Amino acid sequence: MDFDNIECVSSSDGLDEDEIHHHNLQHHHLHQFASPKPHNVNNNNNGNTNVVGGPTVIAPATSVHELLECPVCTNSMYPPIHQCHNGHTLCSTCKTRVQNRCPTCRQELGDIRCLALEKVAESLELPCKYYNLGCPEIFPYYSKLKHEAICNFRPYNCPYAGSECSVVGDIPFLVAHLRDDHKVDMHTGCTFNHRYVKSNPREVENATWMLTVFHCFGQYFCLHFEAFQLGMAPVYMAFLRFMGDETEARNYSYSLEVGGNGRKLIWEGTPRSVRDSHRKVRDSHDGLIIQRNMALFFSGGDRKELKLRVTGRIWKEQQSPETGVCIPNLCS
């Protein structure tokens, strides 16, 4: 997509799959938490978490958790755990990468399972790897990965869709990252008025055109506008994503409007969480979709240049304490 041919003018009111990845995002040394007995986790009144029952610490020089660490990738090992004739272990993923040679002693690996270590792992309970980000949960070793894939404290992926950005972090970090590294436009206010211009609208590629971040109600929202092929037909699409979890996103609604020549299209919906990837939202068609012929009709003139004006607003749904009915709360 030729970005030089795209112009965006913005204004805002008030101001200008069950596949689970191992510990690749960040590796924590959790051996001090390893416990062979169940725990009860209680939250006391001051917000602290107390772990009750059973021994809580194993801290020898070589902990059980360290024994379960693959020497090649340093991720935790899950069945099948393999070993060589000398007893050196490694995970099943790395076994295929080392050409059936033990990375420690260089002996041939064969197909020997380390059943004893697998049994030891089954008896352990460990904290979520995002414990330092606030997660208080403790899980059996073999259940921990499933939780970590959906943990509410896990870092967010960068929502920028113009490149395969691998940066992860919390929301304040990602907002700064979008502003400083991707040079994304930042606006304050819950209304917007964008103008998108492209000199040759018949050259449509699968590419993102624009990402703008809005700050209102103390939250951040990402407004996407792009062109892509839907079957054989090129279309333009605008949609909003909430920089937070899905449960929080449901507290907000937004509308988008595009029009011209006395006609207009209006979309209303709930913003999707940035937990859902940009591609997932786009491929679900959860937003304002404009067919190319309609977009050119809205543009007017000789239909050789795309000139779309997209306006919209964001509001927060609040429940009336008297009636229980949700009423929109518009920012001023």
Image (tube, rainbow, N blue to C red):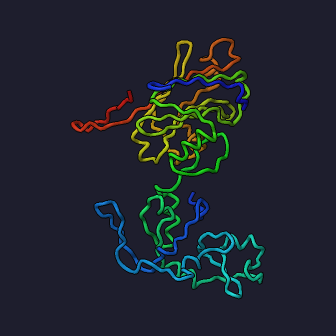
Q: Quadrant of the N terminus?
A: top right
Residue 65 x %, y %: 55, 76
Q: List the single residue furthest toward the bottom.
A: 86
Quarter residue 331 falls in: top left
Q: Nearer the viewer, residue 181 or 110?
A: 181
In the picture provided, is 161 more to the left or to the right than 219?
right
Viewer can see residue 294? no
Quarter residue 199 falls in: top right
Residue in the picture at 64% in, 50% down: 166
Q: Quadrant of the C terminus?
A: top left
Residue 165 x %, y %: 65, 47
Quarter residue 325 falls in: top left
Please tell me whether residue 42 is drawn above or below residue 272 in the rendered image.
below
In the picture provided, is 119 more to the left or to the right than 42?
right
Residue in the picture at 58% in, 77% down: 66
Residue 55 x %, y %: 40, 80
Residue 195 x %, y %: 59, 22
Viewer can see residue 323? yes
Please tell me whether residue 87 is drawn above or below residue 315 in the rendered image.
below
Please tell me whether residue 197 is drawn above or below residue 94 in the rendered image.
above
Q: Nearer the viewer, residue 324 or 107?
A: 107
Residue in the picture at 68% in, 83% down: 88
